[in-house]
């Protein structure tokens, strides 16, 4: 690794100046709020600083990485929402134990929601919310690897969230 | 459902993942119960890049980026300068220290190296991790065992990198690279299951990384080599083509060339020499030959081989002096002998049988002395074809008996020995054919990584 090959600040500034219209259009396309866009730009620049040696075409690489950071921005926000939803459902399940009628109502509503999910997610979330299984136990009972269960759970929470807000948000779009 | 409805701001906070506690549980209970009005509000704040995502704000957001409003990228850069300068200084200092630390590590046994990495912060830097990984990667073809040690060390360093110093995403990227190299080193060391596990872990790390697609392309290329080793050609080509696509779109000519060369190798393995030739030539045009002399040599060596396989002997012969000189320059004896073997095959194809026989015998002798049984087997079968073509039955019988004795002593697998016994019996009964020899050669190639594979000859001529 050659020390002298680190990009100079002038080179980085030149790169940004050249790319400014396309950077702005990327942020517009992904609807990144300005205050968050600055963080994304900073992260992409730091990645460039550390990886520049393997970057042959800085312009193309930078725009590609920025685009992925924008996708990651929304992915991270969705993850936060899934975690909040999961937490809230678990807390609801725990809280309604003292009140049999409330527990029955919640169970009924949850079942009707889960019934609308694909079988794999329905089984997983039923184990989680109605039988109180933790991740390793869920993995064992459904035949998944423990290491892979978190990813599957996240996908199922995503399906549950979309169903809960009854929206036609389609998986696999630019935001997924 | 109750008559209570959450206020819009609370729903927005919840959908941003910023609301917890009893407020969140009430909202969820309400939404699960199916209130269409509140579901509609929640839907507006679903986090994704679409007009509905930021109600009343999406247009503002877009126009602030599309118009002249908002801050210029250059102004944002000015704000980042102090942070960038400090990172640059740290990285420079790490890069200055790295060669000395690598030298020190090289003088220690692996156990001590791992201990240093575990306990000393000097050994827990980005610069050192990259240097160690590149060293391990480069060693792969020549010294697989050492390559494994160095990549394991690289993984250990990557795992000790501070996320607060380098950022969590960057550390995930480097862990992914380290695990990809580890997977590759394990593959070269014939630990295919271990390689598979390392690639799986690398992939999970990359999911948490920066989004740098070059890291993904690197992983895909190395993983494809494992799939090819398992003879899963379709899957292997699929992910290799994805890596090629990434290099094309990111403008990396050298990396694109490297991936094309890898594809060319595999097209040749699949028995399509014409496609292999075209792809290798495309790849060779793009790589920086000074940056990767070995890759350049390997590509040219394979190109000669595929010219030979396609029956284009003149084109193969025309390249021989250049490739032989490259082999001599890079100084790897085993590779030079392999090239001599290829020259012998070309001579045989060209009708120079005496020269071919002499060369096959010398190559066979070298591999026998170096105790590389599979190569001995393959070159012996080339010699067998030559004897059969000339009707030299006595030499063929002697050769098949020698093969059996030699392989038993070199520790070749039981199924392979059984195949050789079958071959020897056919020779003794004077029923050996070109088809049988070719089947046996193909079988021994596969049996290298699948020692329990039984031999089933399919053809005769």
Image (cartoon, rainbow, N blue to C red):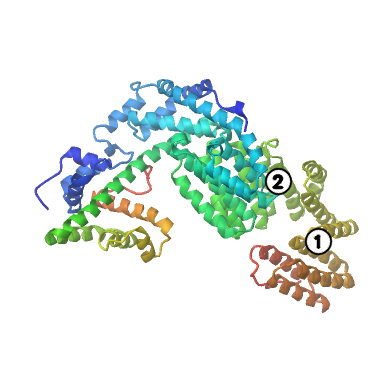
Within the image, what quadrant is residue A119 found in?
Answer: bottom left
- Residue B110, image x and y in percent? 62, 49
Chain letter behind tag 2: B
In the image, taking residue A51 as reference, residue B373 lies left or right, namely right
> Which residue is labeled 2 in the image?
B299
Alpha carbon distance from label 2 to label 1 = 26 Å
Q: Is residue B10 above or below residue A154?
A: above
In the image, taking residue B304 as reference, residue B26 lies left or right, namely left
Mark 2 nearby-residue class (10 Å; few <14, some 14–19, many ≥20):
many
Report if residue A60 is visible in the image.
Answer: no
The label number, if any, that marks residue A32 in the structure image: none
Chain letter behind tag 1: B
Report if residue B52 is visible in the image.
Answer: yes
Q: Is residue B53 above or below residue B460?
A: above
Question: What's the residue at 81%, 56% (across, down)?
Answer: B345
- Residue B273, image x and y in percent? 69, 53
Q: Nearer the viewer, residue B257 or B189?
A: B189
The quadrant in which the N terminus of chain A is found is top right
Q: Earlier in the sequence, mark 2 or mark 1?
A: 2
The label number, if any, that marks residue B368 in the structure image: 1
């Amino acid at each position: 690794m050659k020390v002298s090959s680190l990009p100079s600040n002038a080179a980085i500034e030149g790169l940004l100046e050249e790319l400014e219209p396309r950077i702005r259009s990327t942020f517009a396309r992904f609807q990144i709020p300005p205050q968050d866009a600055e963080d994304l730009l900073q992260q992409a620049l730091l990645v460039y600083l550390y990886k520049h040696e393997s970057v042959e075409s800085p312009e193309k690489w930078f725009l590609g990485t920025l685009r992925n950071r924008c996708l990651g921005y929304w992915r991270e926000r969705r993850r936060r929402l899934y975690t909040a939803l999961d937490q809230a459902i678990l807390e609801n399940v725990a809280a309604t134990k003292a009140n049999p009628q409330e527990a029955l109502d919640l169970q009924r509503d949850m079942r009707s929601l889960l019934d609308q999910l694909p079988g794999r997610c329905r089984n997983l979330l039923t184990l989680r919310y109605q039988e109180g299984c933790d991740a390793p136990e869920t993995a064992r009972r459904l035949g998944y690897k423990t290491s892979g269960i978190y990813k599957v759970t996240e996908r199922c929470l995503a399906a549950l969230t979309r169903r809960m807000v009854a929206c036609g948000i389609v998986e696999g779009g630019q935001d997924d | 459902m109750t008559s209570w409805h959450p206020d819009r701001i609370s729903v927005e906070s919840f959908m941003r993942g910023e609301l917890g506690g009893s407020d969140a549980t009430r909202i969820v209970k309400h939404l699960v119960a199916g209130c269409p009005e509140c579901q509609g509000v929640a839907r507006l704040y679903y986090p994704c890049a679409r007009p509905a995502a930021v109600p009343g704000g999406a247009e503002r957001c877009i126009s602030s980026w599309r118009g002249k409003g908002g801050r210029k990228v250059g102004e944002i850069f000015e704000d980042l300068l102090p942070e960038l300068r400090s990172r640059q200084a740290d990285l420079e200092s790490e890069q200055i220290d790295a060669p000395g630390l690598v030298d020190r590590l090289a003088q220690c046994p692996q156990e001590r190296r791992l201990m240093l990495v575990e306990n000393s912060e000097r050994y827990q830097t980005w610069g050192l991790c990259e240097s160690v990984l590149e060293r391990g990667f480069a060693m792969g073809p020549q010294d697989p065992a050492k390559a494994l040690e160095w990549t394991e060390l690289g993984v250990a360093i990557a795992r000790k990198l501070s996320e607060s110093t380098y950022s969590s995403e960057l550390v995930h990227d480097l862990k992914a690279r380290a695990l990809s190299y580890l997977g590759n080193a394990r593959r070269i060391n014939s630990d295919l299951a271990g390689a598979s596990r390392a690639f799986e872990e690398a992939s999970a790390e990359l999911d948490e990384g920066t989004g740098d697609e070059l890291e993904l392309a690197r992983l895909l290329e190395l993983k494809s080599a494992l799939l090819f080793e398992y003879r899963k050609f379709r899957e292997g080509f699929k992910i290799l083509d994805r890596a090629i696509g990434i290099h094309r779109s990111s403008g990396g000519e050298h990396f694109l060339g490297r991936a094309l060369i890898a594809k060319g190798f595999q097209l040749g393995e699949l028995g399509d020499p014409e496609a292999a030739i075209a792809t290798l030539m495309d790849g060779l045009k793009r790589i920086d030959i000074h940056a990767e002399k070995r890759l350049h040599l390997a590509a040219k060596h394979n190109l000669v081989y595929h010219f030979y396989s396609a029956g284009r002997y003149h084109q193969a012969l025309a390249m021989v002096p250049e490739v032989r000189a490259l082999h001599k320059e890079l100084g790897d004896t085993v590779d030079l002998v392999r090239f001599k073997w290829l020259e012998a095959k070309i001579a045989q194809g060209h009708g120079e049988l005496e020269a071919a026989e002499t060369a096959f015998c010398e190559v066979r002798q070298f591999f026998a002395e170096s105790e590389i049984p599979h190569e001995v087997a393959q070159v012996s079968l080339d010699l067998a074809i030559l004897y059969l073509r000339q009707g030299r039955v006595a030499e063929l019988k002697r050769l098949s008996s020698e093969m059996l004795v030699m392989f038993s002593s070199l520790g070749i697998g039981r199924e392979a020995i059984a195949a050789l016994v079958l071959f020897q019996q056919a020779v003794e009964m004077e029923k050996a054919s070109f088809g049988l020899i070719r089947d046996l050669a193909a079988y021994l190639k596969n049996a290298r990584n699948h020692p329990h594979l039984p031999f089933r000859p399919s053809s005769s001529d």
